[in-house]
Image: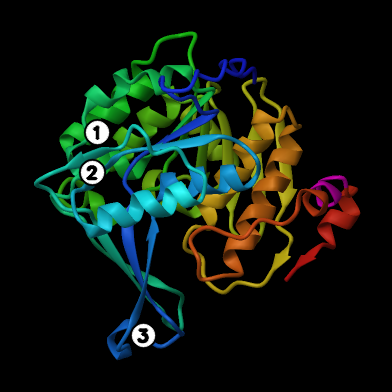
Amino acid sequence: MLLPPPSPRAPSGSETTADVVCIGETMAVLSPWDTRPLAHQSALALAVGGAESNVACALVALGHSAAWLGRVGDDPLGRRVLDDLTARGVDVSTVETDAVRPTGVYFKDPGPDGTGTYYYRRDSAAAAMDPGLASLPLLHRARVLHLSGITAALSDSCADLVTHIVARRAVPGPVISFDVNYRPTLWRHRPADAGPVLRELARCADVVFVGRDEAENLWGTRTAQEVRGLLGPGPVLVVKDAGHGATAYGADGEETFVPTPATRVVERVGAGDAFAAGYLAALLEGRTRANGLRLGHLMAAATLGTREDVPTVLTRDTLDRHLALDNADWSALRLA
């Protein structure tokens, strides 16, 4: 896939540029300090998280410029979101602040079957995003725009924004990256719409990320090849299959599979975002599709081993050594 060339850096005082612009909702996150369930906690740690801003943070950690575009409330949690992302090197200069609507919040709830999440985002500032955001110059200067199906489910105006960017974009223009990110609870008021809406958005994107089990729940597909058949030959498709591996299909029809290295799992929240960031970083760097899948696995593994939504990234030397392994050594790789 050919990416647009990097845009010249804007002079001081003018509109900024970023290789990747990630568009969606970022919220305050409240998490227990240990593995006891939320109901048994007396104190919680405050952080921030959101699928798209997680991708932006991971891309910056990998050495790329990234911006997050969204809306926050004019409240302490909104300021925390902006301060945290700025501290991580993400450009938030075009984020809108809402004087009326609040910043969304979600809670993590550890349990024996994994970490549950509880979201409080109805009528949040982010839910008021609309197609007007698509006209910002920052988007047109980017090499990649990254969105997800979460935003499409937040409100009608958010759905219009995602459709405007993904399905009605100008060609040529930035590469459109779309993570399906099917969240059934967000579609509970119109469950019949989720499959068709997310399928059409995926068909219109240039790069699509989806979990195999997620696609089965959403579309009834059982294998990566069936997902490819459903979406057609247009987008580069990456199908993730948890501990088994990930398969990429190019527009040329070529299939590439890379197994998942053995990884210690502490918490799964954010791992898919880290995978997407790794794959996109490889795309920006002109690496092979196989190395894109490998870098995705490495970033996901870093997230799986922590309770943080955004991982501490391995050094570039270590990443490059892992990417250079032959297939046998990669298959034998164990990541602590």
Q: Nearer the viewer, residue 226 or 135?
A: 135
Quarter of the picture holding the N terminus: top right
Name the residue that disc number 2 marks.
126
In the picture provided, is 114 more to the left or to the right than 248?
Answer: left
Name the residue that disc number 3 marks.
37
Confirm whether the magenta stretch covers residue 321: yes
Q: Nearer the viewer, residue 100 or 190?
A: 100
Sort mark 1 into few (<14), some (14-19) or many (20+) by Cα contacts within 10 Å: many
Residue at the spot 38% in from the left edge and 33% down from the top edge: 199
Residue at the spot 34% in from the left edge and 79% down from the top edge: 44
Secondary structure of the residue carrying tag 1 is helix
Counting the numbered discs, the total is 3
Q: Whole-percent x and y of residue 144?
A: 52, 26
Up-down relation of residue 135 to residue 154 (above or below): above
Sort mark 2 into few (<14), some (14-19) or many (20+) by Cα contacts within 10 Å: many
Name the residue that disc number 1 marks.
159
Distance of mark 3 from mark 2, alpha carbons? 28 Å
Up-down relation of residue 179 to residue 252 (above or below): below
The region drawn magenta spans 320-324
Secondary structure of the residue carrying tag 2 is helix
Q: Main secondary structure of the magenta part?
A: helix
Up-down relation of residue 161 to residue 6 (above or below): below
